[in-house]
Image (cartoon, helix red, strand yellow):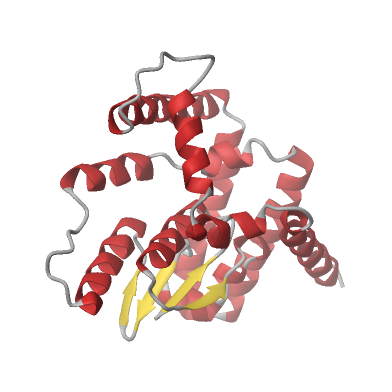
Amino acid sequence: MQLYHHPFSLDSQRVRFALEEKGIDYTSFHVNPVTGKNMDASFFRMNPTAKLPVFQNGGHVIFDTIEIIQYLEKIAKVSSGDENIPLSSSEVIEWMHKIQKWNPKFFTLCHIPEKHRRYVSKFLRQVLIARMAETPDLAADYHKKLKEAYETEEKLKNPDVLKQDKEHLVRLLDEVETQLNVILNLEDEYIGGRPNMAKYWIMVQQRPSYKKVIGKHFCGWRKHKTFVKTWCIVHIRTMLRKF
């Protein structure tokens, strides 16, 4: 089984959490979208949306995060030989869909300095144009991604889009906070924020799966390693394209 992902991709993190919690062995392939690796022809043929993560088990390829997690649950159940192991309840699946409806793209991009964001965006458009020329049979799909890139840039200029995205996130967090108050059986009133989420977050950080999936990428010097490596690759490739 193979997982194509990136450590900073939220959807990739969700799937890796599931893999680690279920104790499923898999081969990890890092695909950095900032350097355009998800636009390489080999990956693009497998997944024309170019989105991460992608899970492959033999000839079975899944792109949808929730479908991947449900598939992993079934694998874990069959592997255990215990038919009494329950799958995710309808309530859990409903929450996964609620979270999935919020797209972190605009929220993430609007917190990146505009100079750097424009630099990377220009680089990725150049990658797409080059791929269109190199692989004519995929040109139509690459063109869709190019159009999407331009549309994203335009939406980032619209304050209403960013406002709606932020409001969606706040509503989701408030709903999670209320739900955790029920699940954790806590009676504390709100104290300057979301105390239940804070307590739940502390619990999550103690999990071995968290330390492996997220912790090691955001502790000490490691949190800068991927950023620096990514920026150097983008800068070098951009300079080479000028010659």
Which sits in the foreground, 169 or 139?
Answer: 169
Quadrant of the rendered image containing residue 65: bottom left
Residue 38 placed where, x, y %?
A: 55, 68
Q: Is residue 6 left or right of residue 240?
A: left
Residue 76 placed where, x, y %?
A: 27, 71
Q: Is residue 193 left or right of residue 222?
A: left
Which sits in the foreground, 46 or 225?
Answer: 225
Q: Quadrant of the N terminus?
A: bottom left
Residue 61 placed where, x, y %?
A: 33, 75
At x 54% / y 29%, what residue is drawn?
A: 162
Q: Quadrant of the C terminus?
A: bottom right
Quadrant of the rendered image containing residue 36: bottom right
Residue 48 appears in the rendering: no
At x 56% / y 36%, what residue is drawn?
A: 107
Q: Is residue 177 left or right of residue 73?
A: right
Which sits in the foreground, 132 or 207?
Answer: 207
